[in-house]
Amino acid sequence: MTPVSDAAGTVVATGARLRLDTLGRIPAASAPLTRPDELRPGVLHLGLGAFHRAHQAVYTEAAMAAAGGDWGIVAVAPRSRDVLTRLTAQDGLFSVLTLSAGPPTARVVGAITELRHAASAPMAIVDRLADPEIRVVTLTVTEKAYRLTPATGRLQADDAVTADLTTERPPTTLPGLLARGLLARYRADAGPLAVVSCDNLPANGRLLGAAIRQAVELAGPPAALTWLAENVTFPATMVDRIVPAATAETVATTRAVLGVTDLATVSAEPFSQWVIEDAFPAGRPAWDQVGAVLTDDVAPWERLKLRVLNGVHSTLAYLGALDGAETVADALTRPGMRAVLTRLVAEDVAPTLSPPPGVSVDDYAATVLERFGNPAIGHRTLQIAMDGSQKLPQRLLGTLADLRAVGAEPRWAALSLAAWMRFVRGRADDGRELPLSDPKAELLRAALAAAPDTPDGVASALLGCAEVVPPALADDPVVRGLVTEWLTVLDRHGVTGALDAAG
Ligand code: CS2
C-alpha cells in the first residue's frame, strides 16, 4: 500500500482507506446516517474546507436521515485539489472527530454525492448552477473570496472580477462564478434557488446578495436582474463550530477510532450552532429538525457571534501570538487574559448588542471562553490571526464605531486593535518574526514602511488604511489616542504589561 501524507506533508498512514466498500469495518457508532450512492443531489456547496465538512454537511446528512429529501451535496473545491483528491478516493466519505475532555469519537458523514474542481473546470459548475436539480447553494469560502472592500462591503470590480463578468472566459473568481451560474440559470429558466453564505461576514446574506446583484448588472441584461430579484434569495445565517485545520494527529486519532484511514477527516469541538433565515423558494433540507434554528431575524444572533465569539477569538489570537502562545487554549492561560476578555465583552461589546430574546451576553461570553479553553482542540493562534483586514471590520471595528457614536471610550476594543497592529508590524514580544498572511498585506506593510516606527506612527499608518478602517474611526482622536496608548504599553512592557492593566 502506498504511504500517504497529511495536510502538513508528513507521511502518516498506510493501510485500508475509508470507502464505501470498507464501511463494514468501522464501528457501528461511527457509521454514516446516509450513503452517497443512495442519494440524489440538491445542494451545491462552494468551499470544501474543514468547516463545511464539520458543519453544514453534518446538518444536511442528519436532515436527510430524519426527514428524507433529495439533498445530496455537490461539493466544489474552488482552488486547491488536495481535499478533493482525498475525498474522491474515499467515495466522498469523511469523518468528523469530536474532541473534548473525554475520549474522542468519530462519525463518518455520507452526504457528499459529487465532487468538482472550480479552478480547472469552472464551466461545469456554471452548468450545475443552471440545473433545476440544484435548489440550494451554500458557501464557505472565507471572507476574502467575496472580494468585497472590507470598509464598505461593496464588490471590488478589480480586473479579474470585471473579466469574469464582461468576457466569455471561464470565471476565475467566486463572484464571477456565481453570477455567471445564476445568469445561466436565468437563461435556462431553471427555477428559483437560495444562495446561502455560511461565512463570518456581517449580514452575510444581504452582503452577498448586493455583490451578486452588482455583478449580474455588469454581466447580464436588465431582465436578468428582475429574474434575480424574483427567484433567488440570499438567506442570512449565523454559523458556529470551532474546527481547526486537520493535522497528522487528527488523521492518526481518527484511524484509531475507525480502524481505517481517512485522509479527509476533520476534528471539531462538540458544540455546533446554525441560525438560518428561512427564505428558501425551492425548498430546503429539514435542518430545523436536526438542531438548526430557522428564523425571520438572524441579525441579533449574527452580531452576537461576530462581536463576542469572533471578536474575542481574534483578540486572543493577536495577544496570544505576540506573547508566544501557539494555541488559543494556551493564550487563555496567560495571567490576566480572561479578565481582559471578560471586560472587553462586558464593557465594550455588550453595550453595542441587542441579543436574541432570552440570551444573556455574559452567559454567552462565559460559554465562549469555556469553549476556547478546550485543550483537546489545539486551534493555532496563527490560523485565526490570518486575514485580519477581512475579519476586523465585523469583529471589532463595528464595536468601536458604535461606542464612539454614543461618545463612549472603547478601552478594551482599542487594546484588541493595537494588538492587531503590533501583529502586523511582524515581531512577537520575544523578537521572533510573525507571519502576515492577509490579502491586504502589501498595503498594510507599505503603510507601515512610510511611517515612523513609533506607537503614534504605527497607529496613524494603519488607521489610515481606508480600505480597512472606515473614515469615522480613522479620524477619531479618541480612538487614535487609545490605540497609541496601548501600543506604547505593548512596546514597553509587552502583552504581559497590557494584561496587567485589567487589574
Ligand atoms: C475563527 C473562526 O478562524 C477564525 O478566524 O475565529 O473560524 C471561528 O473558529 C469560527 O467562526 C467558530 O464558529
Image: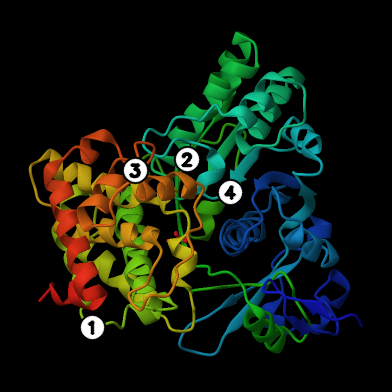
Residue depicted at 32% across the width and 78% down the height: 332
Q: Position of residue 133 (x, y in %)?
A: 75, 37
Q: Is residue 386 above or below residue 11?
A: above
Q: For mark 3, what is the residue?
A: 299
Mark 4: amino acid:
Val
Q: For mark 4, what is the residue?
A: 141
Q: Reading the chain from its start, which is encountered first: label 1 or label 3?
A: 3
Mark 2: amino acid:
Asp
State the residue in front, 300 or 48: 48
Q: Is residue 40 above or below residue 321?
A: above
Mark 1: amino acid:
Pro
Q: For mark 1, what is the residue?
A: 335
Q: Position of residue 346 (x, y in %)?
A: 16, 62
Q: For mark 2, what is the residue?
A: 278
Mark 3–mark 2 Cα distance, whole angstroms, equals 13 Å
Q: Reading the chain from its start, which is encountered first: label 3 or label 2?
A: 2
Depth check, mark 4 against mark 3: the one in front is: 4
Depth check, mark 3 against mark 2: the one in front is: 3
Choose top left, top right, bottom left or bottom right for residue 337. bottom left
